[in-house]
Image (spheres, rainbow, N blue to C red):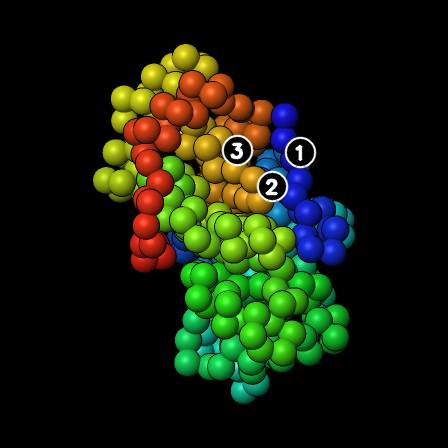
Amino acid sequence: MKENYILLPDGTKVPRLGQGTWCMGERKEKEKNEIASLQLGIELGMTLIDTAEMYAEGGAEEVIAQAIRPYDRDSLFIVSKVYPHNAGRKNIFKSCENSLRRLNTDYLDLYLLHWRGSIPLEETAECMEELVHQGKIKYWGVSNFDTDDMEELWSVPSGNHCVTNQVLYHLGSRGIEYDLVPWMKEHHIPIMAYSPLAQAGSLRRGLVNHKTVQEIAQRKEITPMQVLLAFVLSQDHMIAIPKSGTPDHTKLNAEALKISFTQEEWEQLDKAFPAPNHKTRLDIC
């Protein structure tokens, strides 16, 4: 059985299963369930919580602040992300302060560049290092970076201090396995997988209703969604951050950590949803 944590480059332990918050904070009537979901996740060991200044324009960070109030801050691993247009010297320090204020915390465990923009990577890396020096963040990383982006980041001063790359990854989107995953493993940088259950819509329905997924779920007496999450969690070097809006869903997510596949089941999934054997465009949503 795999460990329930993964190591950052300096040896810091981070939960392999965290909680995403995309779409949280958008509707007041959902807030109570969102808070309850996050708190149950913390109780179940999902102490990594991912958010961004973009999510509900800070609303998700405010929901998290309410959810984490009863807990020891140092027991949590809080991740937020900065807009690309705010990721330079002009705005990044104010953006970080705003996220800290909304989260009601003195520091972020991890601060990510949400995606690439027009600001040079060298400037962003330099600012991230200053935030670390100021004690506002412990680590920094990137999101939605493909292999060539990571190589460019590694070429700038302090670029190799990046501790993770958060990208879309799920059973129906395995393009990163061709070259990004090998590059990240070679450089000992874990991947943080967002949308590990795919986004709600036709793609997700196609995955959960697929004959192979249904058969494996029935055989193991689990849900099809748990099959999808267990697939991501079975990958080496991978952190998963599924979003849940209800405590029941959170509980099912947490149980996915205990699920493992036989070699036959793995081969069935691989055959039904094969990884591409060539370079593909990085999926983003």
What's the CA distance linking mark 2 and mark 1?
8 Å
For label 1, the residue is 3
Per the image, label 1 sits on a secondary structure element best described as: loop
CA gap, disc 3 to disc 1? 11 Å
Say whether marks 2 and 1 touch (CB < 8 Å). Answer: yes
Kind of residue at disc 1:
Glu
Give coordinates of residue 123: x percent, y percent: 56, 82
Q: Amino acid at mark 2?
A: Arg
- Residue, far left: 202
* Residue of label 3: 234
Residue 161, above or below 8: below
Q: Nearer the viewer, residue 122 or 179?
A: 179
Q: Residue at 52% of width from left, 38% of height from top?
A: 235
Q: Is residue 229 left or right of residue 93?
A: left
For the point 46% across and 54% down, the residue is 180
Image spot of residue 161 (x, y percent): 65, 67
Q: Classify 10 Å Cα crowding around label 2: few (below 14), some (14-19), many (20 and above).
A: many
Look at the image and tell me in which quarter the C terminus lies. bottom left
Crowd tier of the residue under label 3, counting other residues whose Cα lies within 10 Å: few below 14, some 14–19, many 20 or above: some
Residue 124, disc:
none
Secondary structure found at label 3: loop
In the structure shown, which secondary structural element does the residue marked by tag 2 occupy?
loop
Q: Residue at x 27, y 26 (%)?
A: 210
Q: 106 or 33, which lies in front?
A: 106
